[in-house]
Image (cartoon, helix red, strand yellow):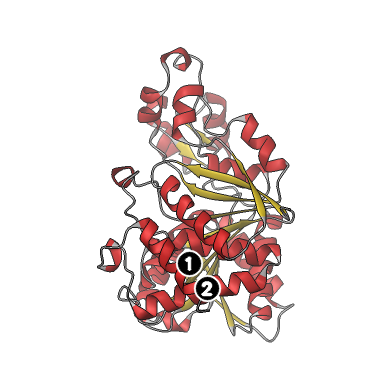
Amino acid sequence: MAKYRVAWLPGDGVGIDVMNAAKVVLDAVGFQASYVHGDIGWEFWRREGNPLPERTIKILKETDCALFGAITSKNKEEAKNELDPKFKDTGLSYFSPIVSMRQMLDLYSCVRPCRSFPKNPLNYKEGIDITVFRENTEGLYAGIEFRPIPEELRSMLEKHSKKMAHFNKFPAEEVALSTRIMTKRGCERIIRKAFDFARANKKPSVTLVEKPNVLRETGGLMLQTMKQVSSDYPEISWSEGNIDAMCMWLLKNPDRYHVLVAENMFGDIISDLCAQLVGGLGFAYSGNIGDKYAVFEPTHGSAPKYAGMNKVNPLATILACMMMLDWLGEKERAMRIQKAVELIVLEGKARTYDMGGSASTSDMAIAVVDTLKRV
């Protein structure tokens, strides 16, 4: 009898391939779950005008957690052009379904482990072990944007900021505005999650990645909150680094960093950089975690040119499964998957194209299954 109900969201492109590979591994490790398929992605935007249909939202509310494959996102004009003609004059606007899920389910903590597996030919350096905590619901990705800016908003902004006068001299249709909205609550809970993780895993330091010298209000709020929260964790040292400088320092001295915490966009940027340090997006996985629900995923895109070719590296998705099992309390099964992946990388017998080999997506899944028998 199934112990868990998991929303199964393959999404677009190679999301289907890597999810099929992940299912083989989950079965092999004895995970007892029923998988409820959910429609999500570009196909449903084109056909229905909604990449996250209500029927899928219902599934999310009736399951224990979700496993997500990959998503295709295109710019505003492409999205409009690919929409079924019957929806083109309805005012619909594409919005990323994964971002919608994060906000709708309050999955405020995006946790992205970046750890170098020994002897991985793609490692930038051995011994890297960085975990990124990215605020997942606010910041520049909140989705509050305008083009053109409504006249009343332009007037209000000019009234409250002299800097707006520079932009108001341009025609309305030539000016776009994206907002970076952050709350004290949002800053505090992601920072506290980072410190809690550091304490539980005996990590010596937490680093805030921001830009408060330029983004004085939003970045200033994050820095102020960091100072307040850190006082509750006296055994853990903390520091701050500007996003641009951190990109340089991580390349120079990645082993100096243990836990990074950032707002939405900066966390997105820094976690991809950290992923490349430990092998690239074929090894990059994450958990979008709230207080009651979580969605686990590889962080790579849908890679349309490889869709259906059984080619891409599924280890990121398999490691996302490991993270999901750990969150559900299935820690022994999670550890077996982690050790199997470590052993595969160490031995180097199965390598996908990104690792310099010729193993297919399904070959790698079978290799993990075979290795599980030895773990």
Q: Nearer the viewer, residue 54 or 276?
A: 54
Please tell me whether mark 2 or mark 1 is closer to you in this view: 1
| Relative to 48, 313 lies left or right | left
For the residues bearing labels 2 and 1, Cβ distance under 8 angstroms? no
**x and y percentages locating residue 329 in the rendered image:** 71, 67
**Image disc number at residue 369:** 1
**x and y percentages locating residue 34 in the rendered image:** 66, 48
In this orientation, does residue 142 appear?
no
Residue of label 2 = 338
Q: Nearer the viewer, residue 95 or 363?
A: 363
Q: Nearer the viewer, residue 256 or 284?
A: 284
Across the whole image, how many numbered discs are drawn on residues? 2
Q: Earlier in the sequence, mark 2 or mark 1?
A: 2
Residue under the point 65% across and 74% down: 332
**x and y percentages locating residue 206 in the rendered image:** 58, 76
Q: How crowded is the residue under tag 1: few (<14 C-alpha within 10 Å), some, or many (20+)?
A: many
